[in-house]
Amino acid sequence: MADFFFRTEDIRPEEVLDYFVETSKDRQIVDALKNRNPVVLVGSRGVGKSFLLRVAQKELMDGFEADRVFPIYISFVRSSLLQSSDPEQFKHWMLARICSSVMRGLAKAGLLGGMPKTIGLLAGGAVTTSIGPTKIEEIADAYEASWKTPKIAVDSDELPSIDDFKEALEDLSEELNISRFALLFDEAAHIFLPEQQRQFFTMFRDLRSHCITCNAAVYPGVTTFGETFQPVHDATMLTIDRDILAEDYVENMREIVQKQADSNFLAQIVQYGKNFSTLAYAATGNPRLLLKTIAQCPKVNSQQVNETIREFYRTDIWAEHSTLSEKYIGHKALIDWGRDFLETQVLQDIKAKNEQYLASDKATTAFFWIHRDAPELVKEALRVLAYTGIVIEHATGIKASRSEIGKRYVINLGCLFALEVSPTNSAFEIAKQLTPKRMTEYGSNFPSYKKLTDQAAQITNDGMELALDVQLSRSASVLDLTAWQLEKLEELGLKTVRDVLNATEAKLKEANYVGDVRARRMRNAAVAAVLEYLSG
Amino acid sequence: MDVVEHYRALLNNSGAVIETMASAAGASEALITSHNYLLDYDSIKMAIADRPEAAVLDSAVKEYQFALFALTSGQYRHAFGGLRLFFELMLATVQFSAHEIDYRMWVKNSKDINWSALKDSQGGVFSTNFIKAFNPEFADCAKQYLAIAEAVYRECSEFVHGNAGTHAILPSDIAFQKQTFFSWHDKAATMRLAIIFAFSARYLNYVTKGATDRMEPIILDALGNLPPVQAMFSQPATDQ
């Protein structure tokens, strides 16, 4: 399998521009991120949100000397792992994270000197150091101490307020001649934790100041904005979508692959241009999907491409969607219904129509439409599908038959192609004649919805903590360990996954014949079991 | 001739060097950045403070500061020499952690720190054996960091050994030399990468949660593109 970067995290931030294929839409987004107005960037997994944030960061840093706008990239990817009953903790966690990122950024750029805590600075006789802790460091320490000890009640009067934080940044900007800080939040709000979404956007709004611009990347399902934040008004909402109907679509997707492929691969792509186009259309504008599938077709010949499309878009792409329902038990009914609705209804309807259209040489479709009065649960199920990138919201407020209003979606083309007997023969024909004018309509009371609405009572929002708790309470025997190791756990009285996770390695080593390596392996198994449910 | 006065005059020249530096574009930033690496080494030190070899790290960072001081006062050859010594002592800290007897003998002056042992491909701190013993996930990436360490050590050695090329580059008196100044910072940055790798591979599996949390941003910044590092820091964050 060819070696491609699927995720922005694997690319060193300073090298990110080497992989950037600039479309006019991407340029617009990067410029908006660099601009003074706050931006919320919306897109499914793998469409390139992190990548564009990194590009904006790099460009701002490169131009810092002239423009004095200082970029700070902050990832909240671990926020879902923070379990706390106190809503204030999440806010403090976010603020601590921002403070330390600001300080690290300034220290690394050589704008702010730091004071080590335990290393003695050179000093002799009358020489004492003039480097002391800054106000922002003190604020960071206070927040840090607060979120790490959730059981101790926090006297909020003692803690710095958001205004203190803003003031500290204003002081810094004046001192360092920085015109403003551009904060770039990645993985900003967790899709299944509306409370975190609310808190994030409230903070986003509260941080507004002449010397701070907030920008955030979120998933399409993030829709809880809290009381103070008003989308459109408080931030420009931008969607990343590579228009599959655009003339240069395949060309752009090819360039993304070219940045990473070797000459041999490039030669294959040229030779099997149509097969490559089929894969590019199948990815429906999502670079990660394209890179993952092309990596499985090093020869780019029809046999490999057909096999990959069938396997990837019939099975692999759904795997991530389906694991969501295991992770978030409260949403299981919703997630599973979404898959069922797409597979048994939407895809079949669209396929049947395309067969007719192609036979009579008419334009084809990959679009469907849902009435705006459809049950909220149905819309929620579609939001989850948009999160994993299986559907993409194409346009809102679209008039359908009898002037009814609703939302138009485009289905991932790969899923549609995977239904073809030989995708390399027929898929390209479907892709190049697509028109949004042809869409399958599902009204406000479409019969399939009932299966979902009947299960409404089972759908809850607190599934996340529940899932974690269920996982932690399972018997330690589910861990991937040898019988001998499990016996040792028993000896030590560690009965559940939680016990093993909480045990220190020293504790594990109390058992006979358990040394460093085995202790580590036993604990790793517990961590892996929990992660399996949490990482996503 | 007043010898004391002569050296006083040289010290005054050092003062002029730092003033010229302060007005050169980007020079103060480069100095502050290199100074701030002390913060990273500080976090590493806190993580291993209870271990005997932490004392070697203390000596190392002291030498780092002397090297920075030599750099700012225009004594470039000594600045590179000091930087190389710092690098050796840092890596020796890691080496000693696995061979306490060597550390005890070193303290008693009966053993030297030796670069060829540190970089040895069988038992050195970047060797597969060494890393597999403490953190097997890091073993695959070690080779490239060994190559970095060897290269930067060799470049500094050229100054220590007085290779002809270095005589041509360095000023013959005490004066600010922009190119050499920035080249020192490049080397300090490269060493930081190799050092953070060596410490992460050796200690990360064995330090407290608090220490790991403290080191997280540092390690992600230096090594965040390595898969084992990403895997490590996607583990659950707990409230404790």
Image (cartoon, coloured by chain):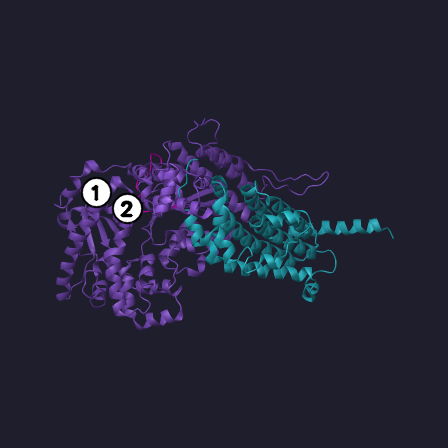
Q: Quadrant of residue A304?
A: bottom left
A232 in relation to A360, above or below: above
Considering the whole magenta stretch, tell me its main secondary structure: loop
What's the mark number on residue A324?
2
Toward the viewer: A209 or A353? A353
Question: On the rendered structure, is A536 left or right of B164?
Answer: left
Taking the magenta stretch, the answer to whether it contains residue A219 is yes
What's the mark number on residue A333?
1
Mark 2: few/some/many CA within 10 Å (<14, 14-19, 20+): many
Question: On the rendered structure, is A511 left or right of A341?
Answer: right
What's the colour of chain A in the image?
purple
Q: Which chain hosts label 2?
A: A
Taking the magenta stretch, the answer to whether it contains residue A513 is no
> Is residue A196 at all visible to an observer of this figure?
yes
What's the colour of chain B in the image?
cyan
Inspect the image, locate mark 1, and give the three-letter code of the amino acid beneath it: Ala
Mark 1: few/some/many CA within 10 Å (<14, 14-19, 20+): many
Toward the viewer: B71 or B110? B110
> Is residue A535 at all visible to an observer of this figure?
no
Inspect the image, locate mark 2, and give the three-letter code of the amino acid beneath it: Leu
Toward the viewer: A132 or A305? A305
Disc 2 is placed on an element classified as helix
Percent across and percent down for residue A350 are 16, 57
Percent across and percent down for residue A450 are 14, 42
Percent across and percent down for residue A373 are 18, 42
